[in-house]
Image (cartoon, grey):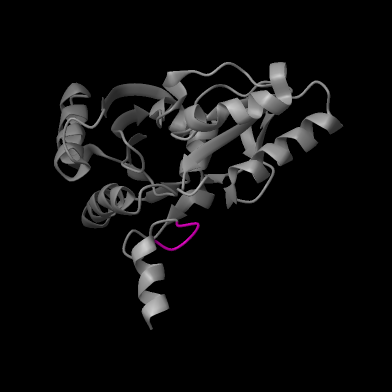
Amino acid sequence: MKILIGDTCLKTASAIMVNGKKILAYMQSFGEEPHSVMFPKLVDQVLNIAETDFNSLDAVACVYGPGSFTGLRIGLTYLKTLAYTLDIPFYVLNTLDVLANMEEGKRYVVSVPLIEARNNEVFTAMYESEKGIYKRTTPYAAKHIDEVVEDAVSLCAKDDKALILLSGDAQKKHIAKFQEHLTDKVLPYSEERDNVDLSRAHLLISEQCRTDPFTAQPFYLRESGAVRMKKKKQ
């Protein structure tokens, strides 16, 4: 089953083509051009490398948020339009789920993705390994970073074997806070975990992720600043 998966939620834009569990092609852009310009190019490049075309696709999947309010809509609009036009299944993947699963799940490791939400807040959730896949154990949430650190401290206090694995575009900014309270419980920082890596995203696709491309909407954990300002004026 050939599936095209795309992401424009954070600073990078990515597209990957898989056939079953085999990766046929994977391309990633690191902000050389705006997502609106770069993402269609990435899709074309992935199709060329995989030696396939749109009509050969069996399904399309999109990382649909949370993330940049503008960025995530670019990939979602492109990919859901493609799925609707081709009349093929369309799947949506949560950015936090993808970030949490960029590495194979390991026992005792708690994966904690952190997406920048401004004002020292992050979009986050906690995940624990189940048969190599990190499964979410807390709700998706927008939280102040201090609250996330407190949650991690509480978890490690209950399980002295627990280790914290951070990822996402806010991990570099906030890892020191975790290290201050948890010292050797926090796994070392890796720049590779700053951005979304789609190389394991296909493992998260299931019928529960399938949705109607015509009605699919971005996943937001809170309204944009522009919307909140508009409501205040009203």
- Whether residue 45 appears in magenta in the rendering, the answer is no
> From which residue to which does the magenta span run?
220-224
Residue 105: where, in percent of width, then height?
62, 24
User: Quick check: 137 left or right of 2?
Assistant: right
- Majority secondary structure of the magenta segment? loop
- Quadrant placement of the N terminus: top left
Q: Residue at x 51, y 44 (%)?
A: 206
The answer to which image quadrant residue 229 occupies is bottom left
Relative to 210, say whether 231 is above or below.
below
The answer to which image quadrant residue 23 occupies is top left
Q: Residue at x 72, y 24 (%)?
A: 182
- Whether residue 223 appears in magenta in the rendering, the answer is yes
Counting the numbered discs, the total is 0
Work out whether residue 149 or residue 159 is closer to the camera in this orientation and state it.
Answer: 149
Residue 65: where, in percent of width, then height?
42, 49
The answer to which image quadrant residue 26 occupies is top left
User: Quick check: 99 left or right of 13?
Assistant: right
Q: Residue at x 53, y 51 (%)?
A: 208
The reply to whether residue 91 is visible in this rendering is yes
Q: Residue at x 17, y 37 (%)?
A: 38
Residue 8: where, in percent of width, then height?
31, 42
Relative to 15, say whether 69 is above or below.
below
Residue 5: where, in percent of width, then height?
34, 38
Work out whether residue 117 or residue 181 is closer to the camera in this orientation and state it.
Answer: 181
